[in-house]
C-alpha cells in the first residue's frame, strides 16, 4: 500500500487499519483535463480538513461513521500533467483495494478519474450498474480532439459496461448528440434526482452498483466550489437525501468528484462535500 498512496491527515472518524477495514477512502489530486477552472486537485486535502467541522454521527440516518470500519489511505501520488500514467496509477490503487475484498470511496479531483476506477470494478463485477449524478452528461466522443477528458468520461465508461447499465440523474447540460446517446445507451433523467432515483430502486436493488457523483449536480448557490458550475441544479438537501437512498442498494464502490474549495472562501463547499462523504458512507457502509 505504501507504493500506491501517500499519507495525509485522516478524514474524521476513519480510524480503522487497512487490514480490518471494509471500506478504503482515498483522494485523487488530479485536474489535468478540466475545461474551465482548475483546482479540484486540492479538493481531497481541503475536504479532509473540513470534515472536522461536522459530526461523525448522522442525525438523518441514526448511524455513526465511527461505527464503520473505514481506512483513510491518503492520496494517490500522481505525476503532474501525465494523464495516461496517472490513470494507470489510479487503476492500480483501485485494483489493490478490491483485490483485498474491500470496497473504496474515492474523492477527486476531476471526473476523468472515474474511468480507471470503474475499469477496476468491472473486472470484479462484470455486470456492474453505474449511477451517475451530474450537471453534465459527459458523453462526448471527444472534447477538442481529446478522447480522455472530464467531458468524455462517461462515454469512455459506457465502452466498459453493458448497454443499459448506465443511469444518469440531474443532467442539465449536454449537446444534442449526448442526449441522443444517453437515451439509446442507458437511462436518462434530466434535471431531477430524488424522484427518478426512487422510481428506479426496484430495478436497481440487488445488482452490483457503482456510484459516481459530480458535485456540480448541486446548484452553485449551494456549491460554488466546483470547476464547471451550472445554474439550475438540485439543492444540498436533495443531494444528501439522494445519497441516503443508496442504503437500499448493493453499492460496491463510489466516488465524489470535481470539488474545488479554493474558489470558495466561505468553505461551505468543502463542508458540504465532507457531509456528503459521511452521509454516503453511513448509508452504504
Image (cartoon, rainbow, N blue to C red):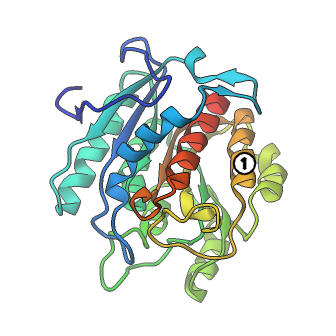
Query: Is 181 above or below relative to 122?
Result: below
Name the residue at 37% across, 14% down.
17
Placement of the C terminus among the 4 image quadrants: top right
Q: Which residue in the protein does label 1 denote?
A: 242
Is 24 placed above or below 241 here?
above
Identify which residue is drawn at 58% across, 48% down: 272
Q: Is residue 219 left or right of residue 273?
A: right
The image quadrant that residue 133 belongs to is bottom right
Q: Residues within 10 Å of mark 1 (few under 14, many from 20)?
A: many
Residue extending farthest to the front is: 266
Horizontal and vertical percent position of residue 73? 33, 29
Q: Nearer the viewer, residue 23 or 58?
A: 58
Q: Residue furthest top?
A: 20
- Residue 7 horizontal side relative to residue 271, left or right: left
> As displayed, is residue 266 above or below residue 103?
below
- Picture coordinates of residue 192 (x, y %)? 76, 65
Residue 190 is situated, as x and y percent measured from the top left of the image, at 71, 71
Residue 42, horizontal then vertical, whole percent: 33, 53
How many marks on residues?
1
Q: Is residue 108 left or right of residue 189?
A: left
In terms of secondary structure, where does tag 1 sit?
Answer: helix
Quarter of the image for residue 282 reads: top right
Residue nearest the observer in this picture, 238 or 138: 238
Residue 133 in the figure: left or right of residue 235: left
On screen, residue 142 above or below 18: below
| Residue closer to the observer: 140 or 221 | 221
Of the 4 image quadrants, the one containing the N terminus is top left
Amino acid at each position: 500500500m505504501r507504493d500506491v498512496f501517500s499519507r495525509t491527515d485522516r478524514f474524521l472518524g476513519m480510524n480503522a487499519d487497512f487490514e480490518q477495514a471494509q471500506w478504503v477512502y482515498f483522494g485523487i489530486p488530479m485536474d489535468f483535463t478540466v475545461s474551465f477552472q482548475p483546482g479540484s486537485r486540492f479538493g481531497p486535502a481541503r475536504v479532509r480538513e473540513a470534515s472536522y467541522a461536522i459530526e461523525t454521527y448522522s442525525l438523518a440516518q441514526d448511524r455513526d461513521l465511527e461505527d464503520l470500519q473505514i481506512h483513510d489511505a491518503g492520496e494517490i501520488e500522481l505525476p503532474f500533467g501525465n494523464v495516461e500514467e496517472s490513470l494507470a496509477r489510479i487503476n492500480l490503487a483501485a485494483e489493490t483495494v478490491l483485490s483485498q475484498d474491500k470496497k473504496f470511496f474515492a474523492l477527486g479531483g476531476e471526473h476523468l478519474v472515474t474511468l480507471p476506477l470503474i475499469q477496476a470494478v468491472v473486472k470484479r463485477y462484470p455486470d456492474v450498474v453505474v449511477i451517475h449524478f451530474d450537471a453534465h452528461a459527459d458523453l462526448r466522443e471527444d472534447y477538442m480532439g481529446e478522447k480522455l477528458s472530464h467531458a468524455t468520461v462517461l462515454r469512455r465508461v459506457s465502452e466498459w459496461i453493458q448497454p443499459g447499465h448506465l443511469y444518469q440523474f440531474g443532467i442539465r447540460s449536454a449537446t444534442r448528440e449526448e442526449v441522443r446517446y444517453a437515451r439509446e445507451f442507458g437511462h436518462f433523467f434530466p434535471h431531477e434526482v430524488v424522484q427518478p432515483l426512487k422510481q428506479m430502486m426496484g430495478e436497481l436493488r440487488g445488482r452490483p452498483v457503482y456510484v459516481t457523483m459530480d458535485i456540480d449536480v448541486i446548484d452553485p448557490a449551494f456549491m460554488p466550489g466546483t470547476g464547471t458550475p451550472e445554474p439550475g441544479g438540485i439543492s444540498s438537501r436533495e443531494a444528501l437525501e439522494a445519497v441516503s437512498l443508496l442504503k437500499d442498494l448493493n453499492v460496491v464502490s463510489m466516488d465524489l468528484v470535481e470539488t474545488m474549495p479554493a474558489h470558495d472562501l466561505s468553505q461551505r463547499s468543502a463542508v458540504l462535500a465532507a457531509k456528503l462523504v459521511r452521509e454516503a458512507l453511513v448509508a452504504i457502509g
